[in-house]
Image: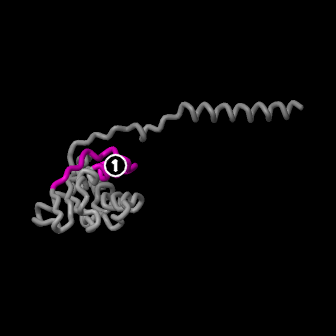
Amino acid sequence: MAITSIFVAFIILIIISLCLIGVTYIDEDENEIPELSSNKTFLIMLKIPDACATEEDLPHLLTERLTGAYSSSPLLSRYFTSVETVDFSSGNATITYHLQFGVPSGDDRFMEYVMSEEVVLNILQQDFHDQNVPGCETLGPASILPDDKLSSTGSLT
């Protein structure tokens, strides 16, 4: 009987400890505010299907869509600062945006693995894939280029 009482008391003690730890645990990484000392800008060109090109408010809707995609991204939301329309051409059915991110300076690995063109593009492609617009299924990114590469090449292609 004594052994059973000790065993039950030990189990109750473990359960109470787990409950208290779960209530009081704070993930420090989740609340960390990184020091963002420089900016990283991307130019992204979206190809607009003919069925969507007639939409009057399309640039505004796509700006909201890009803002939502990067603001809700678990990886990039803390670094995303703004998006703005650079060029809208209904003639060649494209729209170009500036995406701006605040990034920590001096961290080459961060720039290589988190702020790479592939990561930024894949987040947007996944958002367009997850939330298709009826009639505009082929709407999506055509190209992405960091601003520093644009100034050296002189074009967006």
Please state the horizontal and vertical placement of residue 79, each as a whole percent of the image.
Answer: 30, 46
Residue 152 visible to the viewer? yes
Q: Nearer the viewer, residue 43 or 58?
A: 58
Residue placed most toward the observer, 27 or 48: 48
Q: Is residue 3 left or right of residue 23?
A: right
Q: Quadrant of residue 111?
A: bottom left
| Location of residue 4 in the rendering, given as x and y in whole percent from the top left corner | 85, 34
Residue 104 shows in this picture: no
User: On the rendered structure, is 56 left or right of 75?
Assistant: left
What residue sits 70% from the left and 31% below the top? 13
Q: Amino acid at mark 1?
A: Gly
Residue at x 32% of width, y 40% of height: 34
Q: Nearer the viewer, residue 95 or 109?
A: 95
* Quadrant of res 93: bottom left
Percent across and percent down for residue 105 are 23, 47
Disc 1 secondary structure class:
helix
In which quadrant will I find the C terminus? bottom left
**Residue 54 within the magenta-colored segment of the rendering:** no
* Relative vertical location of residue 102 with respect to residue 135 in this rendering, above or below: above
Depicted 137 relative to depicted 103: above or below: below
Q: Quadrant of the N terminus?
A: top right
* Residue range (magenta): 64-86
Q: Percent position (x, y) of residue 57?
A: 24, 53
* Magenta-drawn stretch contains 77: yes
Q: Which residue is mark 1?
A: 68
**Does 4 sit above or below residue 101?**
above
Which quarter of the figure has residue 7? top right
Q: Residue at x 58, y 33 (%)?
A: 21
